[in-house]
Image (spheres, rainbow, N blue to C red):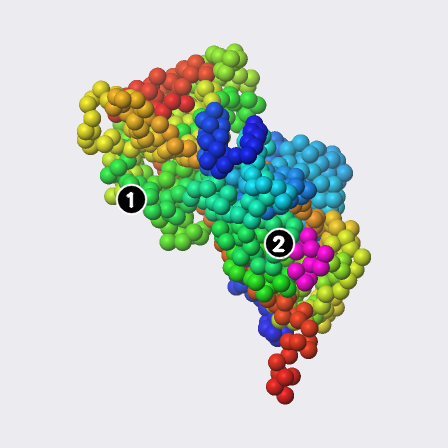
Amino acid sequence: MTIDLTNTSTGAIHDALTQVRRRMGGPASGMVLTLIIVTNEEAQYDAVRAAAHAGREHPSRVLAVIPRKPRAESRLDAEIRVGETGPGETILLRLYGPLAQHADSVVAPLLAPDVPVVTWWPDEVSASPVTAALGAVAQRRVTDAASNDLPRDMLVRLAEAYRPGDTDLSWTRATPWRSLLAATLDQPHPALLTGQVAAEAANPTADLIAAWLRLRLGVPVTRTDSAGPGITSVSFETQDGEIMLCRPDGRTATLSWPGRPDRRVALHRRDIADLIAEELRRLEPDELYGETLRELARDVEPVGAADPAGTVA
Amino acid sequence: MTAEAGETVGLAPANPGVIDSAEPSANPLRDPRDRRIPRVAGPCVLVMFGVTGDLARKKLMPAVYDLANRGLLPPGFSLVGYARRDWADEDFAQLTYESVKEHARTPFRENVWEQLSEGVRFVQGDFDDDAAFDRLAQTVRLLDAERGTGGNYAFYLSIPPKFFPVVVQQLKRSGLSSPTWERARAPWRRVVIEKPFGHDLASARELNATLDGVFPPESVFRIDHYLGKETVQNILALRFANEMYEPIWNRSYIDHVQITMAEDIGIGGRAGYYDGIGAARDVIQNHLLQLLALTAMEEPVAFDADSLRTEKQKVLSAVRLPADLSLGTARGQYAAGWQGGIPVPGYLQEDGIPADSRTETYAALRLGVDTRRWAGVPFYLRAGKRLPRRMTEIAMMFQRAPHLPFAATDTKELGQNALVIRIQPDEGITVRFGSKVPGTAMEVRDVNMDFAYGESFTESSPEAYERLLLDVLIGDPPLFPRQQEVELGWRILDPVENFWAEHTKPEQYAAGSAGPPSADAMMARDGRAWRRL
């Protein structure tokens, strides 16, 4: 059921929700979180769809905050969708004029009581998620460096602003690779000397994986460019030869290991709904992401600027 | 740091044959704080006996695919089918393909299937065919060489238990059951069996003896698929992760407990298996007693296999039967009737059932648990077929409030408070309590507060078999009952079965009704009633 409310208030939205709930016999029970999506008219469709899909695993109240015509007079339009795509409720909030600067005042009364709040910026975000509008209310703040033209720079900015509870979808995208790499190194293996991650030039996930490997393995791990798609290989130099996970087609990876037969395993790229679902699965701060992000930032810092030893000498 | 990484090389489990989990501690890429990386099985071959059976086609093979699709199977994972059919690898691959397409939970992806099917093999033979088992041994060794499965084999015996001895002996004879040491490390062997684990204490021991000589107890995985269900695992979370429930989880507040497993279907094509077994042996001995154990047990010191098992065994050994079995048990057999608007035959009219069969299709028991926590609190267990609907639940029925400061007429509609854990379908938890009816008069009536298990309406909530299969391949045993639990179950049930065999004939109940009148009478004698199905 969809209800359109034009030039409305949060109180009226609340009343409408209560009414719908009565009429449908309480579909809103059991919601596990509020997901705020900070987006724009152009990107909202995909984002809301992904959130609705993730909502099957995590029944939630989705609040999509969409700023409209900044020069118009202040006005709030709401579109309430209940019982269409799955459990939970979706509310599209269109904020006209100066109201867009006070989105938090619209969102605060609409947060589902007693459950955590997650804010997701599918595209642009100011450098510091925690201080961005609607970032402060959330215990989990989800950005996506891949939406930026210069993803590595964005990761560095995110590293500077990092606060526990921040996370980025390019880190979420790394999970299948990291899982496979961890499983690979569960096997007894010769000592790793160096590592290499090859991917498309603008691939923040590859940057994060390289930083993670560097951090965890304590060996040099370089990041090289390939034609893609996405990440094409991760390899380790060992005294016995090269251990390599290679995925040239973005679908199936081959594990080659010196002295053993090649083994293949499916390793596909995931869509945004899967990523969001994974992100919502655990709401405690992801310390490992924070550490990996710092490691990445430390590494890309220009040599001259970040060399205090040099200035002392 | 490089040297440190070097030290992890060649870390071997202390004992051959002992379950070696993935050894996560030694791997620098594993970090307990890293909650995103799932547990992934190590290189291995899954050898499946009885691949043409219903269970294999509808549950096991789809579960294998779903695991692969979720990235939880290792590179090179291989699946070998063994059956009598005269098939080539491709025929078996085709069967797998069809069952995956039809029954898999996750979306079908061509590349996942392609990669999985590369490791699918089939070996044709009877269970007593030496040459066929030698071919099987050859096949898996070839897979080790071709696909790097590391000599780790899991044997899934999805076959009737009467074939266990011969298959297990064949596995021993062909050398498949004994791993060969390689560089101070022995690959693992695991054997998976399904219920029934015998039909009484003696046969359960016999079955165990068959396996025991060949596989060490910790490599035997007994599948009770109920324990793989999210809601069943949630019983432990509900009880031991919360503060609200444990203080009232005892005889001071609980009046009695009802554990129900109702099915709307009849015996279907299982006549050969079901007749002579009956409802009590089929589900009470395993599923319902496991549910009772999880509900009644004390808090385990840790959520690991040994601690859980210790507590379950403790509580199962404290279970007491009613003094007079004729009053504390009931059994029934469904007669022809209307079930859900469809006329259905009675049990005795089903194909393959002898007309004088005394097998029960409904069984109810009143059990006591002799512990300080539960003294005097009866646990009523019932299981039956052709009941009005399919439903499994644990209902904790609370005592009535000691005093009601309302007029008697105000609380006429007020029943007992209840906390109901719904296992299937519609997994979740319901709390029933009294609430004032809106209006001027003071009137209190029962209302429900409902929690639909968040995962239950998700496509990504794994099937029980998926979870259990992965646990087998990883070697993680908490969710698998051990022989001692099986034996404790039979110790509880055997006297009842003996009594029934000697003294009673199952009472007929119409299909689609709530069971035999004697079961209702059993409750009525205690001043209680079954929850409506």
Residue B256 image position (x, y, % from top left): 30, 32
**What numbered label is drawn on residue B247?**
1
Q: Chain of mark 2?
A: A
Q: Residue sitting at 39 percent across and 48 percent down?
A: B241
Residue shown at 74%/35% (left/top)? B94
- Choose top left, top right, bottom left or bottom right for residue A36: top right
Q: Which residues are magenta?
A: A145-154
- Identify the residue position indicated by label 2 in the image: A125
> Which residue is at the front of the view, B148 or A153?
A153
Q: Are marks 1 and 2 in contact (CB under 8 Å)?
A: no
Whether residue B12 is situated above or below residue B110 in the rendered picture? below
What amino acid type should be assigned to the residue bearing mark 2?
A: Val
Image-based side of B75 in relation to A1, left or right: right
Q: How far from the left and from the top, in percent, is residue A3?
A: 56, 29
Classify the position of the C terminus of chain A by image quarter.
Answer: bottom right
Q: Quadrant of residue B516?
A: top left
The subunit carrying tag 1 is: B
Question: Dominant secondary structure of the magenta stretch?
Answer: helix
- The Cα–Cα distance between marks 1 and 2, rounded to whole angstroms, is 48 Å
For the point 63% across and 38% down, the residue is: A49
